[in-house]
Image: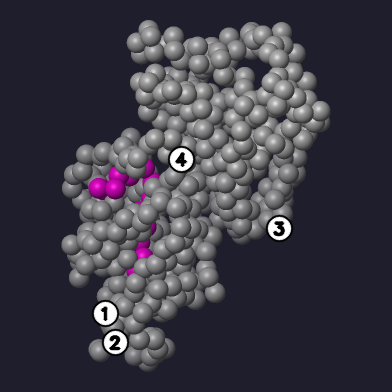
Amino acid sequence: MEERSIPSKFRELEQLDTETLKELIRTDCFTEDLDEECVRYALRIISSRERPQSDRTQGVDDAWRRFQEKYCTPEGEGQSLYDSTPQLEQSEEALPRKRYYLRRLPRKVAVVAAVICTLFATMLAAQAAGIDLWGVIVQWSEETFRFTYQGDNPSSSWMEGSQELEGMELKDYLPAWIPDGYMAENVQTYETQEQSTAIVTFSGENLSTFYLRADVYGDMEQMQYATFEKDDTPVQEQQLSNGGVAYFYTNGGDEQSVFRYQNVICFVSGDISEETAVKIYESIGEGE
Amino acid sequence: MEPEQDRFLEALFGGYYYDLLSYARVCLGSSDLAEDMVQDTFHEATNQVDRLLEHPYPSRWLMKTLKFKICNYTRIQKRHRKYLVECLDLTVFPSEESVEQLVLMKEEQPLFQRLRKVLEEEEISFLVDATFKNYSHSQLAEKYGLTVWASAKRLSRIRGKLLVGFPEHRQRKNR
C-alpha cells in the first residue's frame, strides 16, 4: 500500500507519541466516536512506526488464505465467533431459532422427581387459607430482571415444625414433558437458608445437552432477592396454559428464559429453542 | 458466492484488513485476538455481502462491526472473568502467568471439587485459557484440535454448564 501524505489538519498527530495515539484509538472504541479520518491517520502513523511497509502485501495474502481456510467455511455459515450488536440500519430482527423435532416424553423424569421429593420434603410450604401467596410482580431495568413479592408478609408459621406440611410436592414443579430421546443424566441439589435448588441435566445420544434448574422458595420474600443479569433488550413475557409466566431475555447476546410458577423459579438452559422451552415450562404443574 | 461478490470481498479485505487489524490490536492488546476478531468481521461481511454491495460506505460498516465486537467481547469477558473468580473463590484476578499456579492451589478446595463435578478436566483447562489467558478461538482451536467454530460452541456450552452449576453466583442478591 502506498504512502499518502497526511492532510494538514492531522499533521499534529505526527507530533504525538505512539502511546497517546493508541489512547486516542481506545477512546474512539470504548468511549465516543471520533472523526473517522483522524482515527484512520492515527492508525497509519502507528503502523508506520511499528511495522515495516514491505510486510504488508505478503501479510494480507497470508491473512486472506487463513480467512478462506479457517473462518469462511461451511461450518461457520450464518454464525459469528464474537457478538456484534445491531448494525447501522438493522431493525430488531429475531435471531434464527434452532428447531428440534419434538416427540414424546420418557418416563425417567418421574423417577428423578421422586428422588428430589424425598430430599426437599422439609422445604415445602403449606398454603394457608386467605393469604395471597402468589402476589409477585416482575420488574426489569436495562441491566437486571427480578421478582418482587407484593402479597402479605409470609410468616414463619409456614414452617412450624409440629405442623404437617401439606400442599404442593416438588414433583409438581418438574416438567411432565421433555423432548424425545432425552434422559435425566444427572441430578444436583443444593440447599441454602432461603431456597432449595435442583439442577437436572438432560442428555441424549447425538443430542445437545440441556439443563433444568428449579429454585423452590420457602419464603416468598426471598424470591425478590434473586436478580438476573440482562442486556438492554426488552424482556418478552408469555402467559402459559398452566398459569405460570415465562420471561425471555438476552444477556450478553445469549438467549435466556425464566419461568415462575407459584413459589418456584425455573430455568431451562442449553442449546434449546424457545418453543421447546415453552413446552417444558407448560408441562410444569401437570401432576397437581 | 457469486464471482462478483467474491471479488468485492477480496478487494475489501485487501483494502481494509491492516487498518482493522491495527485498530483491534490497539484496543485488545493481543495480536491473536485482534486477528480472530478482524477475520470474524470479514466473515460477517460474507453473510451480508448483498447489503454491503449496495452500502455507500462498506469500510464504515466494517469498522463499526469490529468496534461492536470488541466492545461486547471486552464487556462480556470482564463479566465471565469475575464470575469464574467467584466460582473458584479467588481473591484476585490471576495474571496469565499465575493462573496455572492458582488453579493448582485450589485443586483440593471444596469449590474447585464442585467445579470438577460440573466440568470435565479438559473443559476447565479450556475455560481457564479462554477466560483468564484471553485465548482467541484460533488459539483454542489449535491447542484443543478443533475448528474455530467448534471452539466457539464448546466455550458457550461450558459457560452454560458453569452458570447452571453455580447458581448462587448467577443471581446477584440485592440486600
Real-space Cα distance between discs 1 and 4? 46 Å
Mark 3 belongs to which amino acid?
Answer: Thr
Q: Are marks 1 and 4 in contact (CB under 8 Å)?
A: no
Residue A87 at x, y percent in the picture: 43, 35
On the picture, is A4 further left or further right than A188? right
Mark 2 belongs to which amino acid?
Answer: Ile
Q: Nearer the viewer, residue A118 or B81?
A: B81
Which residue appears farthest toward the front when viewing the image? A8
Subunit that carries the residue with mark 4: A
Residue at which label 3 appears: B91
Residue at which label 4 appears: A85
Label 1 element class: loop
Residue at (34, 54) in percent of width and height:
A248
Label 3 element class: loop
- Residue A175 position by quadrant: bottom left
Please give the label number shown on residue A131.
2
* Quadrant of the frame with the N terminus of chain A: top right
Q: Are marks 4 and 3 in contact (CB under 8 Å)?
A: no
Q: Are marks 2 and 4 in contact (CB under 8 Å)?
A: no
Residue at which label 1 appears: A167
Q: Tell whether position A63 is magenta.
A: no
Above or below, comparing residue A16 to residue A140 in the picture: above
Q: Residues within 10 Å of mark 3 (few under 14, many from 20)?
A: few
Return the disc, 2 or 4, that comes first in the chain's sequence.
4
Q: Residues within 10 Å of mark 4 (few under 14, many from 20)?
A: some
Mark 1 belongs to which amino acid?
Answer: Gly
